[in-house]
Amino acid sequence: MRRLALLLAPLVMAGLMGCAKSDSVTGPSPGPPKWTRVSSGLPSSSNTSALTASGTTLLAGAEASGVFRSTDGGVTWTAATTQPTNSIIRSLTASGTTLLAGTNGGVFRSTDGGVTWTAATTQPTNPTIYSLTSNGTTMLAGTNGGVFRSTD
């Protein structure tokens, strides 16, 4: 009888402390992470070639279709109101509230969360921008002619 009491004591304690049956599951789900396609509003005929985030705004760059924005965690997407004049978006980056898009026609800038885009004041001498990154006010653009640096 004493053994039975010793075996049941931890189970009784667990039940009293809230480890009883529950209809909800907490913690990570078993198995590998699951991916869900979230492309409502993105063109089906374009490759999504670049992604970045600025605060709660997500941006997607589509080859030949321009820049798209999401403010609901990527569930739905809308096209930027004013697109870069070159719609082949190869890269995107964010530096504070300034967003940059690298295209086949240079660097484009947005300061309104990606709603409107204008050509950057200065451009790399090679206008096909394959990659962008930023660190504070320093921005780098990777092209097939090398890496270009800008602080404006």
Image (cartoon, rainbow, N blue to C red):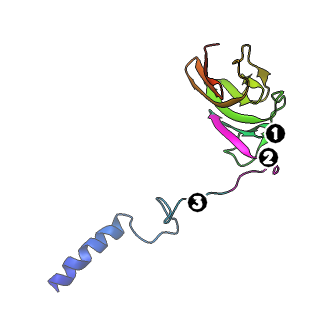
From the viewer's perspective, tell me whether residue 140 is left or right of residue 40. left
From the viewer's perspective, tell me whether residue 139 is left or right of residue 127. left
**Relative depth, front residue between 61 and 22:** 61
Disc on the earlier residue, 3 or 1: 3
Residue 96 quadrant: top right
Q: What quarter of the picture does the N terminus occupy?
A: bottom left
The residue lying at 69 percent from left, 26 percent from top is 100
Residue at numbered disc 3: 34
**Which secondary structure lies at badge 3?**
loop
CA–CA distance in space, label 2 to label 1: 7 Å
Q: Is residue 56 visible?
A: no
Residue at numbered disc 1: 64
**Relative depth, front residue between 22 and 44:** 44
Packing grade of label 2 (10 A; few <14, some 14-19, many >=20) is: some
The picture places residue 64, in percent across and down from the top left corner, at 81, 39
Give the magenta range.
37-53
Disc on the earlier residue, 3 or 2: 3
